[in-house]
Amino acid sequence: MKQERLEILVVEDQSSAREAMQFILVPKYKLQFAPDLKEARTQLNQKNFDIVMLDMELPDGVGLDLLKEIRQSNPNQEVIMVTAVSSVNTVVETMRLGASDYLTKPVDAKRLLKAIEKIENTARLQWEKTVLLQKVQESQERYHGVVGQSLAVRNICNTVSKLKGTETAILLIGESGVGKEVIATAIHKQEENILRPFIAVNCAAIPENLLESELFGHEKGAFTGATQARVGKFVQADKGDIFLDEIACMSPTLQAKLLRVLQDKEVEPLGSTKKVKSNFRVIAATNQNIQTMIEKGTFRQDLYFRLQGIEIYIPPLRARVEDIPLLVEHLLKTLAPKFGVRHFAQDAMQILSEYEWPGNVRELKNTVENILILSRDEIIHAEHLPPHLNREKTKRDSGMFAHLRANLKNFERDVIITAIKRNRGNKSRASKELGISRSILYRKMRALDLEENELF
């Protein structure tokens, strides 16, 4: 549906009804009229209309016949049926055939406008959704799966594009949930060799006593429970990338062993005396302040320098709010097979865009999924959002209005003081200049705690 004035074809044989439609709908909408089915078919063949208002009884046939034809030739055409006689069977048949709404004569102006506005709002949401989906697709194609349009995302992806073909270590820094693994995956995906391995390890999710074996591998019998040899992640990443998420969770002992592996590109499995060569690129990530950890002695400075070949900072979601609509649309598309096609109305999207998102993209994803689980409506409005999001909006609005009230109070105080000073303390002349009575002026002075010594 077009974003300018809607064009409506009114199929109606009664001149009085046509005049009523014109009075209600012009100039907000563009109208074309057809007095019978023959003329309606001619006009529908010549151009596309946003809405067809179709009378049930016409001189040359029944409106339902044309509705069936419209459904066959243009399934997306919006049609509002109008009839002088309403019956349950007629309403059911009309809606079964795909009419958008059903009105009875004489048509109520408010009911008519509401029916058109409903179609208009749905069309606008669909248009916005189409635009967002196009932007999501363009972003994913350009940035190897990264969704975003903010300057921060564009700068990150510009940096990522320069890493193609390099073996330099990369360190991704950002709060939990900002999408560090998504960026790591994008770095990997731009390489031309589709067989190049990508091995991801969450260092925080694996117990310390198992992490060393997970990374470096072990021989059979190397420790209790080692019933067979295991190839470590670094060897699996040979000629590819290994992503070490939450690298700061490693103990100092394991950090020292990791440093040796990064320096020599050789791995010694537990229980073995032989080293295995592995040519990998390491992509590490952390949500911790590495500099603070170095100062406290909990992270090795030499390991930091080894990991910090290229350092990329990923800002929190609250610092790139323009990415939120695209991320929401991407999530809706991803979840559509499970929850069906859904839309977020403007009021809901506004609240999502204003929320701080301490959990970043991960929290946004969980929130969208929870909303889809709890709401069965096709269009999600503000009332469908979790209560804490609406409470946060109320707090923000209250703070904004409190700030506004304070500014208005200070402005009013300055205006009154200026008026009284300009009239050398004469309250009558000052009140006359301000356009208020003397009694109101005194009342405002008391409310603003204005002292006489402030007025001279």
Image: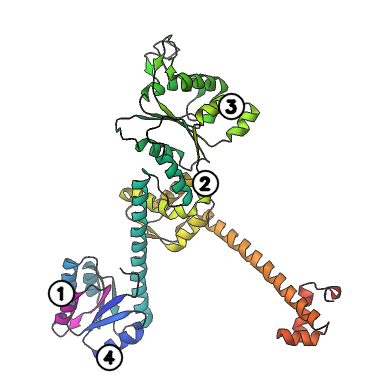
Q: CA distance from mark 2 to mark 1?
A: 57 Å
Give the number of the disc on residue 316.
Answer: 2
Pinpoint residue 45: horizontal percent, then vertical percent.
16, 74
Element at label 1:
helix
Pinpoint residue 351: horizontal percent, then vertical percent.
50, 58
User: What residue would you read off at disc 3?
Assistant: 301
User: What residue would you read off at disc 1?
Assistant: 65
Instruction: Bin the neighbour count of mark 2 within 10 Å (Cα to Cα): few under 14, some 14-19, many 20 and up.
Output: many
* Foreground of the two, 417 or 335: 417
Tell me the magenta residue range. 37-61
Instruction: Bin the neighbour count of mark 4 within 10 Å (Cα to Cα): few under 14, some 14-19, many 20 and up.
Output: few
Q: Are marks 3 and 4 in contact (CB under 8 Å)?
A: no
Number of the front mark, 4 or 2: 2
Mark closest to the chain's N terminus, 3 or 1: 1
User: What residue would you read off at disc 4?
Assistant: 16
Amino acid type at mark 2:
Pro
Mark closest to the chain's N terminus, 2 or 1: 1
Res 325 → quadrant: bottom left
Q: CA distance from mark 4 to mark 2?
A: 61 Å
Number of the front mark, 2 or 1: 2
Mark closest to the chain's N terminus, 2 or 3: 3
